[in-house]
Image (cartoon, grey):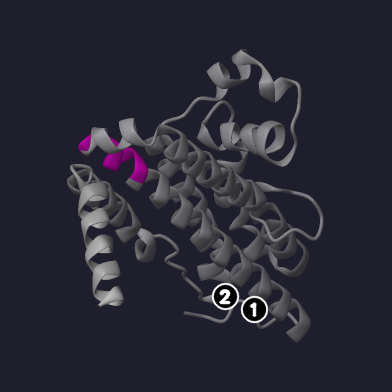
Amino acid sequence: MPNRTKQMNSDQRANLDAMVLALGKTMGQAWSYYYVLKGIHEGSKSSPRVAEQFPWLLDQIWRGAFDALFAKVGTVLDATSSTFSLPNLITLIRRYGNAELRGLIPEAEVCLSERGGALEKIRNWRHSNVAHRTARGDEDSFFDDNKMNLNEIEGAMDRLDLAINHLSWHVLSIHSDTKSAFEPLADQGKELFLAASNGLAGPAESISVSSQVGRAEARA
């Protein structure tokens, strides 16, 4: 494909490269947390005894992964100056690019301008409940207004990936698959729940007997 950055100087190209690399890493981390959540969700459904046995632990793991996911996706959406984010990638292309490159921007901006959808809810969670502890974020109405399921979150993240790759491919000839490498985490989560479920019946007694045998052998 034609080199559309030939009108840029080396510093400008390096700034774009750094932005796209950082966005790829952030989205990869976000997908890893998403699939941890999916593994917990599906594992809890397939092995409910585990969820019943360890509700507090699993709730804390869920909350930690949830906060990490929304912190990372929220960063990608953040328009704060100097942040590695989609809005600031758009700013760089608008600043450095010619008319052809600037013509790519509206398609990428579509996902940023949606109102009432999953991406706006992610922004709300990140601002009011994750990055900052606000009074609004503690209200029951906040949870009602911003509730989402995993499918909605996945769809929002897919749209972000598409927007970033739309720009990075046409400007830099870079396409990043930030998602597929982390998909196995969901299956590992389910397998972990299954293993825990299989071990719930009598593991303490077995461990105790083994320990006693070990101690007896040591004394001998």
Q: In this figure, which residue is indicated by the disc labeled 1?
A: 5
At horizontal 26% and vertical 61% (from top left) the residue drawn is 212
Q: Where, by quadrant of the figure, is residue 177 drawn? A: bottom left
Whole-percent x and y of residue 213? 22, 66
Query: Would residue 19 be found to the left or right of residue 185 on screen?
Result: right
Q: Main secondary structure of the magenta part?
A: helix
Q: Are marks 1 and 2 in contact (CB under 8 Å)?
A: yes
- Which residues are the magenta region? 40-46
Whole-percent x and y of residue 97? 70, 68
Comparing labels 1 and 2, the label whose residue is closer to the camera: 2
Circle 1 crowding by C-alpha within 10 Å: few under 14, some 14–19, many from 20: some
**Front-most of residues 44 and 49:** 49
Sequence-earlier tag: 1 or 2: 1
Q: Where, by quadrant of the figure, is residue 54 drawn? A: top left
Circle 2 crowding by C-alpha within 10 Å: few under 14, some 14–19, many from 20: some
At horizontal 63% and vertical 47% (from top left) the residue drawn is 71
Q: In this figure, which residue is indicated by the disc labeled 2?
A: 172
Q: Secondary structure at mark 2?
A: helix
Q: Amino acid at mark 2?
A: Leu
Whole-percent x and y of residue 192? 28, 52
Whole-percent x and y of residue 10? 74, 86
At horizontal 30% and vertical 60% (from top left) the residue drawn is 184
Q: As drawn, which residue projects farthest toward the right?
A: 81
Q: Where, by quadrant of the figure, is residue 202 drawn? A: top left
Assess whether residue 45 is covered by the magenta stretch.
yes
Instruction: Check the image and report above or below for 5 versus 44.
Output: below
Q: Secondary structure at mark 1?
A: loop
**Front-most of residues 129 and 124:** 129
Q: Is residue 114 at least partly visible in the picture?
A: no
Query: Would residue 48 be found to the left or right of residue 12 on screen?
Result: left
